[in-house]
Amino acid sequence: MDWLADIEKKVTALLAQYIDPEIAIKLEYASKKNALSLSYEAFMAQNSTLRSQEQRFGRSLFGMHLDDIQIHFQGKKSRQFSSRGQQKLVTLLIKVAQIQSMDTFDGAVLFLLDDFMTDFDETRIAQLIPLLYGLGCQLIFTCPIRGRILDTLLIEQGAYQVDLTHSNPGAI
């Protein structure tokens, strides 16, 4: 999986440049049906009822869209051993690496971070804002909490702030 190795390499470089060079991650593709090492004939022999099940359910029951990517953070499975903040950090960096990989495509990128930054402390937010602005894409942040460093850093970068709620319930 060259694409997964490329994403892992980019995330490792982002960690080293913006967060902490001592943090190590490993991304591992996990096929639910172990189809990667089998020939078509061997796979179908092992899963002889697959076609009839797919016809009965009206959908595909195997493939990359159903497989997982296991994330190892500091040598341990992230799902079980990482904090929520660590999991969100790695997820964010994977998305950043994907956006960086998209630079070969024509067209604009829109990156929506919906209430994503609230789990990070001020130090982590200050580390991430320059990284996000360096992507050169349109960024949209939503956040239910006001008055944090996030507001200040975004405004310093020239961001527009739009309030979607009002303190006066009758106002439009």
Image (cartoon, rainbow, N blue to C red):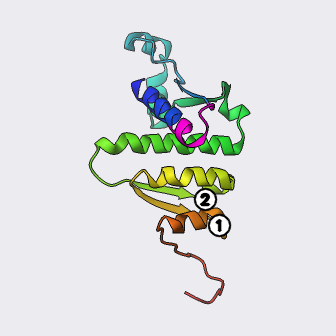
Point out the residue furthest to the bottom here: 170
Answer with the quarter of the image where residue 82 lies. Answer: top right
Which is nearer the eye, 65 or 116? 116
Q: Specify the amino acid type for callout 2.
A: Asp
Estimate how packed mark 2 is, as few (under 14), some (14 to 19) or many (20 or more) residues with alpha carbons within 10 Å: few
Range shown magenta: 14-23
Q: Give the percent coordinates (x, y) of residue 29.
A: 51, 25
Residue 144's disc is 1
Answer with the quarter of the image where residue 24 lies. Answer: top right
On screen, residue 31 above or below 60: above
Residue under label 2: 115
Q: Give the percent coordinates (x, y) of residue 6.
A: 43, 29
Which is nearer the eye, 17 or 125? 17
Estimate how packed mark 1 is, as few (under 14), some (14 to 19) or many (20 or more) residues with alpha carbons within 10 Å: few
Q: Residue at x 72, y 40 (%)?
A: 83
CB under 8 Å between callouts 1 and 2? Answer: yes
* Total numbered labels: 2
On screen, residue 60 above or below 160: above
Q: Give the percent coordinates (x, y) of residue 33.
A: 52, 21
